[in-house]
Image (cartoon, helix red, strand yellow):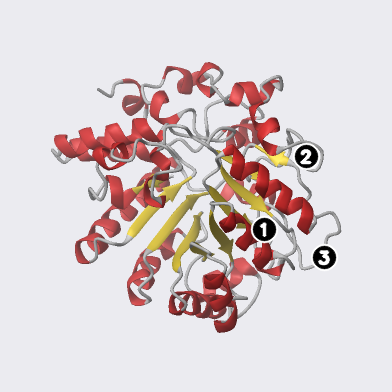
Amino acid sequence: MIGISKLYCGGVHASDALRYGRMSSKLPSHLLQFSEDKKPVIVWNMTRTCNLNCVHCYSQSKNLRYNNELTLEEGKAFIDDISAFGSPVMLFSGGEPLMHPNFLDLCFYAKSKGMRAVISTNGTLITKELAKELKKVGLSYVGISLDGLESVHDRFRGKKGAFREAIDGINYAKEAGIKVGLRFTVNKRNAQEIPGIFKLLEEENIPRVCFYHLVYAGRGTKLMEEDLSHEETRQTVDAILELTKEVYSRDNQKEVLTVDNHADGPYIYLKLLKEGKKEEAANVMSLLKMNGGNSSGVGIGCVSWDGEVYADQFWRHYSFGNVKERNFSEIWTDTSNPLMKQLKNKKEYVKGKCKDCKWLDICNGNFRVRSEAKEDDLWAPDPACYLTGGEIYDAK
């Protein structure tokens, strides 16, 4: 996760994170990525059921009821364990988490245990009444996925009217006093929609947007050949940077982030240097070092609807164990598992240009799932890294 508004526009300085001691339990949410202890943020795909049929769904969800989900009691036991372990955030996801019969109870329970509760949703099921209930149980943030403006989004989601329903959900959440944000996964089919998303951000007074680089998992694997080329990625990141600068100049509370490609960090640093902003670049470098790059298997973890534990929400082909049989905290710290041990120190295992890259300390090898999907080699260079040879080897 790379905070564009924080790094490129100077919204955060290294001293901001240091002021809190960089412990995840003390950091405000916008600084969590700079924590030192790296207690894992948990993505809980609490249900596989979903009312939509999205073309890039990593969980390959369908609109049917699955019978292998954690029970209410098992869910509470899971929350007991990870809250005691020190995980600062529970991100409820799916499928569509609002279709889970115990969502409100489990959200309230996570809050009662001192965790921050957030949700990733398609937004179509948020009514005015439900938004009030979400506020009552203490939900901190609602992230609503959009894939473009109306016609593009509806095609991605497989339902006419999904865009309008999502916008209604955003407005109901805002009316209830819940912070909302957009989640947008970039690929060849929708990159041209990004300026429209920025316009929507201002028109609807939405405080936050996250632009996700495509990860090749689930149905997203079928879009692998529709991922942006390296040059297209650079153009897209440039556009996001410029649009962020424009929006930030009018409203410095707007938060823009990119997610799932840590090459964005060095790219921003180098861009600031080219612009002659050496002091700003030095601050960015300090923050990138605090961030530490890809955190799969360390600072982010995933538990599926059936209790299986994954390195992140995209790594569904390899489970480290099941929380029905063993506590998450035990599974997560058990380095007798060879892959878990490797993920705790990825830099020792990456190959090729990643191994020799001058940015390895702040990128941490980027996304291993993409390498495995594209190159059939877990430790090969991430095929989505768009930095040039000169930027990788000759940077100062």
Q: Position of residue 60 (x, y in %)?
A: 72, 55
Q: The C terminus is located in which quarter?
A: top left
Answer yes or no: do the residues labelled 1 and 2 have beta carbons within 8 Å? no
Badge 2: residue crowd in 10 Å (few <14, some 14–19, many ≥20): some
- Which of discs 1 and 2 lies nearer the camera? The answer is 2
Furthest-right residue in this view:
67
Q: Secondary structure at mark 2?
A: loop
Q: Position of residue 153 (x, y in %)?
A: 54, 70
Task: Classify 49 as above or below 80.
Answer: below
Q: Secondary structure at mark 3?
A: loop
Q: Amino acid at mark 3?
A: Arg
Whole-Å distance between the Cαs marked 2 and 3?
A: 21 Å
Q: Specify whether 209 is left or right of 220.
A: left
Front residue of 335/269: it is: 335
Front residue of 55/3: it is: 3
Whole-Å distance between the Cαs marked 1 and 2?
A: 17 Å
Q: Which residue is mark 2?
A: 322
Q: Specify whether 273 is left or right of 243.
A: left
Q: Earlier in the sequence, mark 3 or mark 1?
A: 3
Q: Which residue is mark 1?
A: 94
Q: Earlier in the sequence, mark 1 or mark 2?
A: 1
The tag on residue 65 is 3
Badge 3: residue crowd in 10 Å (few <14, some 14–19, many ≥20): few
Q: Amino acid at mark 1?
A: Gly
Furthest-bottom residue in this view:
128
Q: Amino acid at mark 2?
A: Asn
Q: Position of residue 238 (x, y in %)?
A: 31, 49
